[in-house]
Amino acid sequence: MAADRTNLTGAASSAGEGGKDIAVIGSSNMDLITYITRMPGEGETVEAPDFAMGFGGKGANQAVSASRLGSRVLMLTRVGNDLFAESTIENYRRNGIDTTHVLPTEAASGVAPIFVDEESRNSILIVKGANALLSPQDVRRAEDQIAACRLIVLQLEIPLETVYEAVALGKRHSIPVLLNPAPAQPDLELEKVRDCQYIVPNESELSLLTGMPVDSLDDVRNAAAVLLEVGIANVIVTLGSRGALWMTRTEDRLIPGVAVEARDTTGAGDAFIGCFSHFLVSTGDTATSLEMANRYSADSVTKRGTQSSYATKEEFEEILRG
Ligand code: RIB
C-alpha cells in the first residue's frame, strides 16, 4: 500500500545518525514453563513431565524476534536487582539489541509461571515486578533515541501511563506507533491511543477493548470498526491458525494462516508482532508483512519455549524457501 510506504519512509528519513529501526517499550520476564498433563485441583499435588526456564515478557519477545530477523532494535525496559537481571541484559546483547535503556531497578525482575498442556494450550501468570516501575519519565529520558527510530512497538505489561506517554512521543515526532493491547486491560483508554498507526489485538483482546462479541468473522469486523472509528489507522486482529484480519477505512483483508502441528503456542503472538514490525520497517508493505508474520509465528509454535522458538533471519529464509 502506497500510504503505508509513505508513512514509514517519511519517518525513516527523519531518523538521526545511528538511529535504530524499532524502539520496543515494554516488559522483560523470566518464563518458568511447566509442561503438564493436567492442572492440579485444590489441595492436590500432581507430577508434571517437564520444565524449562527461558527469557520472555511480551516486549522482550517482540524485540528479540525483530532483531533476529535483522532489524536494529532499541529496548526500553526495567529489570530487577536479582539473579535474573544480569542474564536478561546479557540475552538482549546476545540478540544484538541496544541495551542503553535496559534499566536495573530496586525490585524483583518480572516472572511468568507458564503451564503448557498436552494440547499445546498455555495458561500464563505474570508477576510484573520491575516492569510495573517503567515510568513515563523513563520514556521522556530516552526521547532522543526513540525519536531516531522508525517504529515504536508497545504492549500492556507496563503501566498504562507509560504507554500513553510513548504514543504521545510518537505523535510529536511523527513516528508510527504499533500497540499490541496484550494482556487485555479493561482500563485502557482508547482515546489516549487513537494516534497509533497500528493496533494488533487477538480476538479476546478485541472483545474486551470494545465490549463487543467476536463469535464470527463478521462480529470481529464490527468490533474492529469501532477501533477505526476511534481514529486508529490500521486494525489487525490475529486469529490464531486462521491468520489475521487487516482493516483500515478502505481495506478489509483476511490474510490466511499457515497450517502446522503445534507443540507450544507460548509467545506466538509476540513472534507475529516482532516479525510484522521487522518487515513493516523494511518493506513498508502491510499485506506482505502480515504474510511473513503468519509464517514466522506458525513456525514458532512447532517448537517449545518462547524466545527459544524464534527463527533467525537465515532460518526463516530457509523456511520461506522450503
Ligand atoms: O506472550 C508470551 C509472554 O507473556 C511470555 O513470555 C510471558 O513472559 C508473558 O509476558
Image: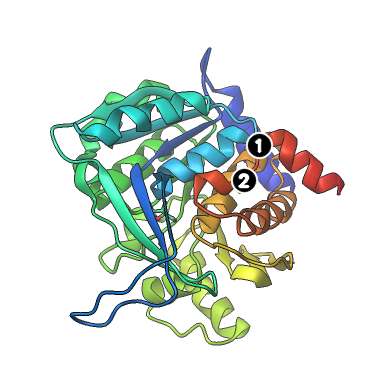
Label 1: state its secondary structure.
loop
- In which quadrant of this rendering is ligand 1 seen? bottom left
- Residue lying farthest to the right in this orientation: 321
- Does the rendering let one see residue 199? no
The percent coordinates of residue 142 (x first, y second) are: 33, 25
Label 2: state its secondary structure.
helix
The percent coordinates of residue 163 (x first, y second) are: 32, 47
- Tell me the crowding category of disc 2: few under 14, some 14 to 19, or many 20 or more residues within 10 angstroms, Cα based: many
Q: Quadrant of residue 8?
A: top right
Kind of residue at badge 2 = Cys
Q: Quadrant of residue 12?
A: top right
- Which residue corresponds to mark 1? 312
- Residue lying farthest to the top in this orientation: 17
- Does the rendering let one see residue 166? yes
Q: CA distance from mark 1 to mark 2?
A: 11 Å
Instruction: Write the residue at 47% across / 60% down.
Output: 231
Disc on res. 269: none
- Which residue corresponds to mark 2? 275
Relative horizontal placement of residue 36, taking residue 297 as reference (left or right) = left
Q: Earlier in the sequence, mark 1 or mark 2?
A: 2
Q: Nearer the viewer, residue 84 or 179?
A: 84
Specify the color scheme.
Answer: rainbow
Q: Nearer the viewer, residue 70 or 200?
A: 70
CB under 8 Å between discs 1 and 2: no
Nearest to the eye among marks 1 and 2: give it.
1
Kind of residue at badge 1 = Thr
- Residue lying farthest to the left in this orientation: 106
Q: Nearer the viewer, residue 160 or 230?
A: 160
